[in-house]
């Protein structure tokens, strides 16, 4: 008994010491961990949380970016954007309509092109890697320089008109160029946005297709299901979650992004390519230092609310798939 | 513990280093008599300002560092962020007639009244008071609500006017036109355009930076409408509750005159920015280009010889109130001294030199931009014959002179940007007729009046 009691007593005495040491060690490890994440937390607090709170406050004020004080106006900026200002509200409605058209068209266009492309790529074995790199090129190169290049290509004497005329499709050429023509300006920008978003969508689809068990497809084929039926009843249902993610990414990017509109048309001609993101930027920086930063912030928050609603809708759609 | 001390020591060192960096980050000019820093939003001014700075240094021993931030949105953001970090330069070149007053009203500019009130007679008469806080400006510009009437936030630097047509002499000649004879009327101008577009369908038209939509309204339509209607009826277009607005028979007639340009715009004109339109003209892609007096400098920078260009103001329409249109110069940019400068005396001295006949002459000759300083009979010798030649459009009887700076008859919250899109839909887009455009413009003007 004594032999068994002694080690127990010793354990009882030494255990607290050990656990205190372990706690210290754990605390040290935690401290190191906190130290490592501290820069990210500080960055988020300064560049993320601070600016979010700042911009939310600003959306209830009038300010030009340098005056010592803000003039609080309550909800007036929001009211002006939505209906109260007879000059601003119609512009915003026009921009919202263009944004909506672009969101739907870019998302749908991306899916319609990326899915068949990924299916084709998945069905070949030779040159798959090379072709994947080729199709991914627009994503790597898309940016300001490429937008400028597109502008040159789309000018009245640009490559697109030249190509159309040289293959006997001169009736499709646009004498004013594709960006100066009100009928083609927005569709052209949508096509370029689709061109930029297809690569990532294609890769996501390709990953999804490669994750499908070949045995399932083989069994379906043995049961007499043709290629179309396999695509419709097996492949597509398995790819729906990826499609939802791609659509959401397309909607979000089109709603919040405005660089392409700023660089290629600046909303023109005559407002035919105005979008909400561009209007927010113009209100912030193109008003000759007028106190319109509040309106720009309010518009930014309205866009955020729309994005949030989209995210909620997406989450519900994904849950529905499960 | 040793590890913790090391971490603490490293953190303390980092904080000290950051603090030291922050303390040392100010621009020059903080110490009295030190070097000055100047910001401009015009890249085309930098070389000329540096030449003037070299002459200034030879006289005073004070260094001036000139920096340009373009385009306008970048310059705006730069001022906003520098104001927050108290890192503004000593001197700013700003747009006159609004931007300078807003920045001054925001507390960023020093009052130059004491330094320059006695020297304003050196400037062209119509530009002298461009940077002054008046009661009317105080009532209309929110940022001036706390400003003192009489304060001077900027002195005029460059002057000029819009509505100058530049014609490519070679293209005129190729179309069988006399390259030394400008069209006398709007109708003759249209026949010129008809001839040049007939001679060269794709590269014989008219260029203008219509991507900045208000250029059509500000640089062509207003001058055309003023000349056709005369000052009183022109002012009525913008009146509060007016029945003689853009939708009236007079207003529609002026819109019809403007719409007559529709067949002659160069292809793709509505997608061109101002610089792009000028470059297109300099590259021979159009026969005519509309701009301002400041356009000459940009054309020269893009390789077009000034001797290859014929210049004239927007020609007045036949049967109108004005048969020989003149264009009053307005201050386009002004010079301001910031309220945070540590060397206000040196900064004011630099502004004084730049606006003196000597400094203005150096600047104008190098930049091909007209100074607001009245150079009188020395103009041609100081700024050269091409630039001096543009000044001939400035002088004439008051009733024949369109003055873009005369804004008293417009709504207090007048925004020219909003006038641009309806006119663009009229021409070159052709999406609306004159009657619809007139009604739209009247609605826009009414909304501006109702806004205040």
Image (spheres, helix red, strand yellow):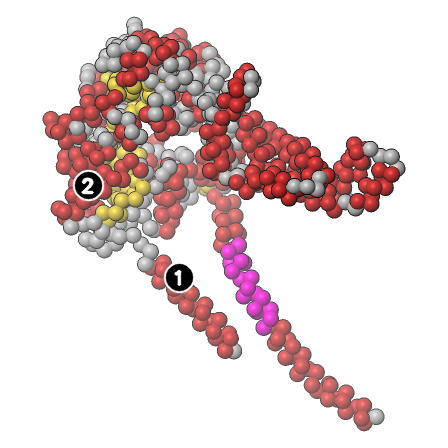
Q: Is residue A167 visible?
A: yes
In this picture, which residue range is highlighted in magenta? A28-44
Image quarter hosting the N terminus of chain A: bottom right
Image: B27 above or below B317: below
List x then y, in percent, for residue A171. Answer: 55, 15
List x then y, in percent, for residue B417. Answer: 41, 26
Chain bearing tag 2 is: B
Q: CA distance from mark 2 to mark 1?
A: 37 Å
Which residue is at the front of the view, A256 or B267? B267
Residue B52 numbered tag: 2
Q: Circle 1 sits in a helix, a strand or a loop, which is it?
A: helix
Residue, x 27% and y 34% (percent of image)?
Answer: B333
Mark 2, other Cα within 10 Å: few <14 / some 14–19 / many ≥20: many
Nearest to N terminus: mark 2 or mark 1:
1
Residue, x 24% and y 52% (percent of image)?
Answer: B29
List x then y, in percent, for residue B309. Answer: 26, 21
Which residue is at the front of the view, B143 or A275? A275
Q: Identify the residue at the far left of this view.
A: B377
Residue, x 30% and y 44% (percent of image)?
Answer: B67
Q: Main secondary structure of the magenta part?
A: helix
Image quarter hosting the C terminus of chain A: top right
Mark 1, other Cα within 10 Å: few <14 / some 14–19 / many ≥20: few
Viewer-nearest of discs 2 and 1: 2
Q: Which corner quadrant of the image does residue A26 belong to? A: bottom right
Q: Which corner quadrant of the image does residue A99 belong to? A: top right
Q: Circle 2 sits in a helix, a strand or a loop, which is it?
A: helix
Instruction: State the residue position of label 1.
Output: B18
């Amino acid at each position: 008994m004594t032999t068994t009691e002694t080690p127990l007593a010793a354990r009882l005495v030494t255990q607290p010491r050990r656990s205190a040491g372990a706690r210290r060690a754990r605390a040290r490890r935690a401290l190191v961990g906190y130290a490592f994440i501290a820069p990210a937390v500080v960055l988020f607090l300064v560049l993320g949380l601070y600016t979010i709170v700042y911009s939310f406050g600003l959306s209830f004020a009038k300010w030009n970016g340098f005056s010592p004080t803000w003039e609080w106006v309550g909800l007036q900026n929001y009211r002006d954007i939505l209906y109260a200002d007879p000059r601003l509200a119609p512009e915003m409605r026009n921009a919202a309509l263009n944004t909506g058209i672009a969101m739907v068209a870019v998302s749908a266009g991306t899916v319609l092109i990326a899915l068949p492309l990924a299916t084709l790529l998945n069905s070949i074995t030779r040159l798959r890697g090379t072709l994947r790199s080729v199709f991914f090129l627009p994503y790597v190169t898309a940016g300001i320089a490429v937008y400028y290049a597109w502008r040159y290509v789309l000018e009245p004497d640009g490559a697109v008109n030249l190509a159309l005329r040289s293959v006997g499709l001169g009736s499709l050429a646009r004498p004013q160029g594709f960006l100066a023509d009100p009928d083609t300006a927005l569709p052209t920008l949508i096509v370029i946005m689709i061109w930029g978003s297809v690569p990532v969508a294609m890769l996501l689809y390709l990953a999804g297709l490669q994750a499908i068990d070949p045995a399932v497809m083989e069994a379906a084929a043995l049961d007499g299901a043709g290629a179309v039926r396999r695509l419709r009843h097996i492949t597509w249902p398995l790819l729906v979650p990826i499609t939802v993610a791609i659509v959401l990414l397309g909607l979000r990017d089109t709603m919040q992004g405005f660089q392409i509109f700023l660089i290629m048309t600046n909303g023109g001609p005559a407002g035919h390519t105005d979008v909400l993101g561009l209007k927010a930027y113009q209100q912030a920086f193109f008003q000759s230092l007028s106190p319109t930063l509040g309106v720009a912030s309010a518009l930014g928050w309205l866009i955020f609310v729309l994005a949030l609603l989209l995210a909620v809708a997406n989450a519900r759609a994904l849950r529905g798939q499960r | 513990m040793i590890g913790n001390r090391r971490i603490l020591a490293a953190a303390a060192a980092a904080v000290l280093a950051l603090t030291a960096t922050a303390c040392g980050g100010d621009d020059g000019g903080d110490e009295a008599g030190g070097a000055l820093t100047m910001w401009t939003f015009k890249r085309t001014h930098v070389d000329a300002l540096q030449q003037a700075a070299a002459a200034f240094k030879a006289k005073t021993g004070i260094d001036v560092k000139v920096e340009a931030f373009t385009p306008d949105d970048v310059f705006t953001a730069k001022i906003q962020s520098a104001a927050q970090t108290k890192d503004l330069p000593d001197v700013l070149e700003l747009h006159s007639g609004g931007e300078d007053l807003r920045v001054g009203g925001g507390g960023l500019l020093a009052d130059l009244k004491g330094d320059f009130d006695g020297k304003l007679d050196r400037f062209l008469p119509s530009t002298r008071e461009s940077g002054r806080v008046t009661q009317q400006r105080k009532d209309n510009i929110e940022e001036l609500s706390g400003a003192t009437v009489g304060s001077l936030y900027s002195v005029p630097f460059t002057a000029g006017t819009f509505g100058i047509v530049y014609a490519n002499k070679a293209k005129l000649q190729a179309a069988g036109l006399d390259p030394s004879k400008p069209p006398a009327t709007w109708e003759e101008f249209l026949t010129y355009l008809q001839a040049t577009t007939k001679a060269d369908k794709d590269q014989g038209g008219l260029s203008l930076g219509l991507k900045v939509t208000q250029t059509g309204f500000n640089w062509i339509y207003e001058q055309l409408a003023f000349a056709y209607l005369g000052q009183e009826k022109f002012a009525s277009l913008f009146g509060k509750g007016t029945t003689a607005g853009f939708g009236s028979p007079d207003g529609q007639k002026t819109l019809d005159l403007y719409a007559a340009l529709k067949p002659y715009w160069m292809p793709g004109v509505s997608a061109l920015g101002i610089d792009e339109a000028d470059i297109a003209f300099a590259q021979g892609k159009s026969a005519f280009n509309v701009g301002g007096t400041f356009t000459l400098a940009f054309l020269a920078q893009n390789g077009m010889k000034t001797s290859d260009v014929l210049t004239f103001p927007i020609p007045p329409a036949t049967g109108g109130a004005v048969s020989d249109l003149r264009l009053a110069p307005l201050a386009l940019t002004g010079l301001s001294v910031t309220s945070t400068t540590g060397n206000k005396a040196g900064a004011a001295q630099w502004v004084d030199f730049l606006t003196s006949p000597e400094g203005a002459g150096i600047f104008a000759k190098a930049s091909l931009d007209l100074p607001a300083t009245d150079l009188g009979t020395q103009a041609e010798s100081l700024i050269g014959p091409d630039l001096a030649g543009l000044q001939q459009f400035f002088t004439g009887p008051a009733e024949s002179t369109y003055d873009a700076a005369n804004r008293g008859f417009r709504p207090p919250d007048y925004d020219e940007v909003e006038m641009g899109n309806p006119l663009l839909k009229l021409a070159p887009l052709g999406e609306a007729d004159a009657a619809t455009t007139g009604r739209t413009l009247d609605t826009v003007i009414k909304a501006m009046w109702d806004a205040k």
